[in-house]
Every structure is written in C-alpha cells, then in structure tokens.
Image (cartoon, helix red, strand yellow):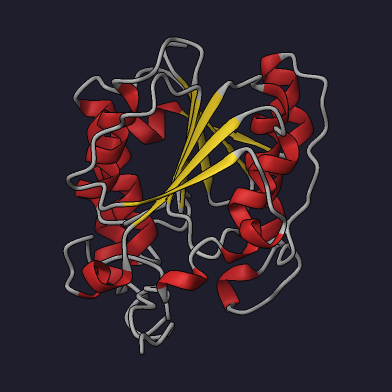
Amino acid sequence: MFNKIKSKLKSRIDNQVSAQVASQLAPTFPNLNANVIELNNFQELKKVFGWKGDPILDRPDIDDFDYIEDVNERRKRDSESIATVMQNAQAKVALEIGTANGMGTVLMAANAPKTKIYTINIEPEEALTGAGGKLITVAMQKEEIGIEFRKRKLTNVEQIYANTATWEPNIGMIDVAFIDGSHDSEFVYNDTKKVLSAMEPGDFILWHDFNLELAPKYNWIGSVCAGVERLCAEGYVKGRIFHIRDSWVGIYRVGQ
C-alpha cells in the first residue's frame, strides 16, 4: 500500500536552504527580478486585464493550516489567483498538470463550468521510482487521485494518468494551463514548453509554487523559479509575470 507521506517531499524535512545558499540564489533570477509584477490582491489582477468577474472560492481546504508555509492565508491567495483567471479567461480548454486529490480541479471547474478541463497526474508506482522528478508533493494511491472532483460528478473534467516527461499534449489547443506537477526545474521547463506549443497569444500559464521572495528559503519553490527563469532566458516566456502577494502562483499571459 502506498503511504501518502512517503513521497511528501514538501514535508519540511530538508526544505530549508542555508543562509549562505539563500544569499546566492536571489541574483540567479535576473529575468524574473526584472519581469515579475507584484500585485496586492485579485482586484488588482482584474484591473490589469480589464476583467469583471470575481473568483468563486469553492475549495474545501482553502482555510486549512497544515504547515507553517500556510501562513498569510497562502491557500486563499492561491485560490484567488487560479479562480480569477479561470473565471475571466473564457477558456474552451484548460489543462491541469498535477491532479493530486482534485481540490484544485474543483476550483477550476467551479469558475469555468463550460470549460473542458483535462487534469493529468503520474501514476503512484512510477512516481515512487523517481521517474516523475524528485520534488513532487505526494504519491497518492491511484484511487485517491482526483477523488474530490469525482465526488462531485463533474462532467467537464477528464482525468489522464501519465508522466509529463514522456506525455505529449494531445488535447488540441490549450487556453489555460496550471502547472503543478513535479517541481524539479527541468520538469517545469519541459512542461511549460510542451504547453506553449499548444497555445496562442492571449492564453494563460499559471505556475504553482512560484514566489520569488520564498525562493531562497524553500528548495522546491527555488526550483520552480529556476525553471521559469530558464524559460525567460531562452525566450520561451516573454514579458510580465504577475504574482499576488503571499500567493504561490505565477500568472503569465502568452505573448503579452
């Protein structure tokens, strides 16, 4: 039987980076330091894009406090970031990389009930081999992956089991992508490149565990930022990335 805790690489065992390493990390993100725009709240995100719809914060764990990293209502800020984009982007197709228990999928679907949402997760046996990267959140039992959205019998969600290291998007054009699978920088880089190949200017990419302020403190956040920094340096990501204060979500509009 798979233990949820076994692969919980965010379990705060080795997530603290030493002060010396932390002081060296910040200068390694010159593109992000130049292009990330910090917003105070989701209302400012709405202003940036001229949006009208408020987010529907339908997520069962939004007020949970399981770890010290949940301070400053981090889960609520994350939900506001994701839900505001889904509420207003008018997406026909959305992709979630990293289903976990499906609470994030529920949030996406609640804000975009007419959007076809594909959610992909590596199978637990493969995750435990390390083939899906080292910095994954949890290797759940297969029946628990996506359990929250299945409870609600959502008809606009389709579940995919695959490792994005080898999976190629075969779902047509993608209007919104939420990338929250492996947090290894190589996976963030490759997952984003694959998604971009199925996107057009004006579409949205959201990266979870993205927060420049916390990058020197938590290794998985630093790894995600490193992956996005490489995308910027190589020209795959161009222009501003928006970030709501205290959230762990980076928001990028393709080609703008």
User: Horizontal and vertical percent for residue 5?
Assistant: 42, 85
User: Horizontal and vertical percent for residue 226?
Assistant: 27, 46
Using the rendered image of the protein, determine whether residue 74 is visible from the camera's viewpoint: no
Q: Quadrant of residue 45?
A: top right
Q: Quadrant of residue 195?
A: top left
Q: Quadrant of residue 66?
A: bottom right
User: Horizontal and vertical percent for residue 152?
Assistant: 72, 56
Height in image: 12 above or below 204?
below
Height in image: 129 above or below 196?
below
* Picture residue at 55% right of the left edge, 65% below the top: 101
* Picture residue at 60% right of the left edge, 49% below the top: 105
* Picture residue at 24% right of the left edge, 44% below the top: 28
Q: Is residue 156 left or right of residue 5?
A: right
User: Horizontal and vertical percent for residue 17?
Assistant: 32, 72
User: Which quadrant, please, contains the N terminus?
Assistant: bottom left
Height in image: 122 above or below 168?
below
Height in image: 37 above or below 69?
above
Using the rendered image of the protein, determine whether residue 150 is visible from the camera's viewpoint: yes
Residue closer to the observer: 156 or 254: 156
Q: Is residue 111 left or right of residue 20?
A: right
